[in-house]
Image: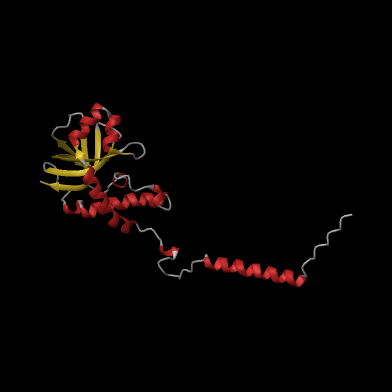
Amino acid sequence: MSAKAAPARQASPGLRRALAGAAVVVLLGAMALDTKVIKIGSAGDVRNAVFSAADYGKSEFPKVQADVEARAADAATIATAIAKDRATAEKEYGVPAGVGPVMSVKFTGVVGEGKSGIYKVAVDGLPDTLTVRVQTGPAINGTELRDATGKITFGQFTNQIEYQDAGSALNNEMKKEVLAKVDTSALTGKTIAVVGAFKLVNPKSWLVTPVRLEVK
């Protein structure tokens, strides 16, 4: 005949309370080790992380300008490539940006008539069917500067408003650093050298946002 197992002894209420208390202490200790104390008003205070469009434009425009200048191809080269094979030209010279790629371009030409700060420019080597225009303000529209490098993405911002503000900030900083040095009200008939970016939507009409504009 087998012996009956001795009944398990139950912990006393006092022991159970002691064990529970010890568990709470261990848990609180672990939470304390995993908690970072941030002083109000310090650099780590998230309330200080407010997006400043003006600061963004000032810090990022020189980077965009340098990138566009580095990748800019001659206007005649781009026009020829588009006419030959648009899809291949977009991959070679463009940066994907929604409805059309943004292309960095450089050219020298004679300024024609203008309206609302947008001037037509006659560029040697381009077909007569292609119209090149440069926007000089006061209003600078579009997000070509924001999108030209492929390095500024929506995920870098808190929301769509900040993303749009970043584009406007780059345009505004370009006006200060580039267009403010030029008499944009008296360009007709003059020869200008331009480096800039345009969105390829209509291959027969380019609207270029400059990152550099010099009057010859």
Residue 130 or residue 114, whichever sits in front? 130
**Residue at the image position 13 percent from the left and 34 percent from the top:** 124
User: Residue pushed farthest right?
Assistant: 1
**Residue at the image position 83 percent from the left and 59 percent from the top:** 5
Task: Residue 200 in the image: state x and y as whole percent.
Answer: 29, 36
Residue 91 or residue 102, whichever sits in front? 91
Asked where in the image residue 147 lies, by quadrant, the reply is: top left
Lateral position of residue 25 relative to residue 138, left or right? right
Task: Residue 191 in the image: state x and y as whole percent.
Answer: 11, 42
Task: Residue 181 in the image: state x and y as whole percent.
Answer: 17, 53
Asked where in the image residue 122 lies, by quadrant, the reply is: top left
Does residue 116 appear in the picture of this structure? no
| Picture layout, residue 211 above or below residue 83 | below
Does residue 46 appear in the picture of this structure? yes
Q: How is the image coloured?
A: secondary structure
User: Residue pushed farthest top?
Assistant: 84
Asked where in the image residue 31 lies, by quadrant, the reply is: bottom right
Lateral position of residue 187 relative to residue 143, left or right? left
User: Residue pushed farthest front?
Assistant: 1
Task: Residue 102 in the image: state x and y as whole percent.
Answer: 29, 40
Count of numbered badges drawn on the protein: 0
Residue 201 or residue 62, whichever sits in front? 62
**Residue at the image position 20 percent from the left and 44 percent from the top:** 195
Lateral position of residue 30 relative to residue 71, left or right? right
Please identify the quadrant where the N terminus is shown.
bottom right
User: Residue pushed farthest left?
Assistant: 216
| Picture layout, residue 161 above or below residue 20 | above
